[in-house]
Amino acid sequence: MRRRGERLLALAIRLLPAHRRDLGAALLAEASMVPPGRRRAAWLTGGFWFVVKESAVRKVGYGLGIAAAVVMLVSIDRIGTSDDSGQVSLLVLLVTSAVLGFIRPRWAWLAGLIVGSAIAISEMAAVAWGPAPATPLEPPGVAGAATLFVLIVPALLSAYLGAGAALLLRRSR
């Protein structure tokens, strides 16, 4: 059982990103120093949890970040009733796109497209199925909501500015 757990952990460590594999290998090397029994099983379980957490965050975390940015942007846009609510929504769009571009520079295009089209899609859905917006659209209806796809441009620019900042930061190290 002991050897099987260590072999499984060794296989799982291969799933880690390259910059985290050394830590996984250290976890595996230290497992032989832990007394057999429950303590070693707990150590190996902790190693598996580390691999799962690091792999899941890598694969799922960015998608959750985009989803959180979209929910925040659409919520702020829908509840805003003041004269400056459009500017606040634009600020949230720019900041979230830049942060997402900074986090994953190679995926900046995805953040720009999704975050940039979020308000247009939510307005189109509201026109089709939901309550009337707090501020009427010009032109009215789906055509007015479709004009909001222009927000993809500033979202993409902001995402790529964030990506550029990340690349500059990595080069300076």
Image (cartoon, rainbow, N blue to C red):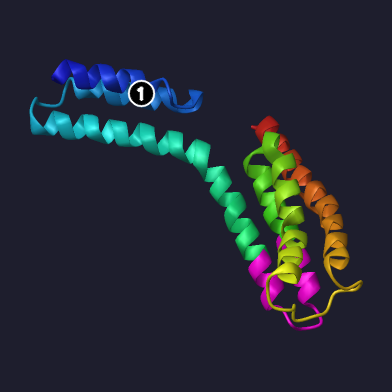
The majority secondary structure of the magenta stretch comes to helix
- Please identify the residue farthest to the front as the structure is shown: 129
Residue nearest the viewer, comparing 169 with 7:
7
Q: Quadrant of the C terminus?
A: top right
Residue 24: where, in percent of width, then height? 36, 25
Q: Residue at x 37, y 23 (%)?
A: 13
Residue nearest the viewer, comparing 67 with 172:
67
In the displayed structure image, the side of residue 64 where residue 16 appears, left or right: left
In the displayed structure image, the side of residue 25 where residue 164 appears, left or right: right
For the residue marked with disc 1, what is the amino acid? Ala
Q: Residue at x 26, y 16 (%)?
A: 7
In the displayed structure image, the side of residue 159 where residue 173 appears, left or right: left
In the displayed structure image, the side of residue 30 where residue 51 appears, left or right: right
- Please identify the residue farthest to the right as the structure is shown: 139
- Please report the bounds of the magenta region as a residue range: 74-92
Please identify the quarter of the rendering in which residue 85 is found: bottom right
Q: Residue at x 74, y 79 (%)?
A: 132
Residue 52: where, in percent of width, then height? 37, 35
Q: Quadrant of the N terminus?
A: top left
Dot 1 lies on which element? Answer: helix
Magenta span includes 23: no
Q: Residue at x 76, y 39 (%)?
A: 164
Please identify the quarter of the rendering in which residue 171 is found: top right
Residue corresponding to mark 1: 12
Please identify the quarter of the rendering in which residue 83 is found: bottom right
Magenta span includes 90: yes
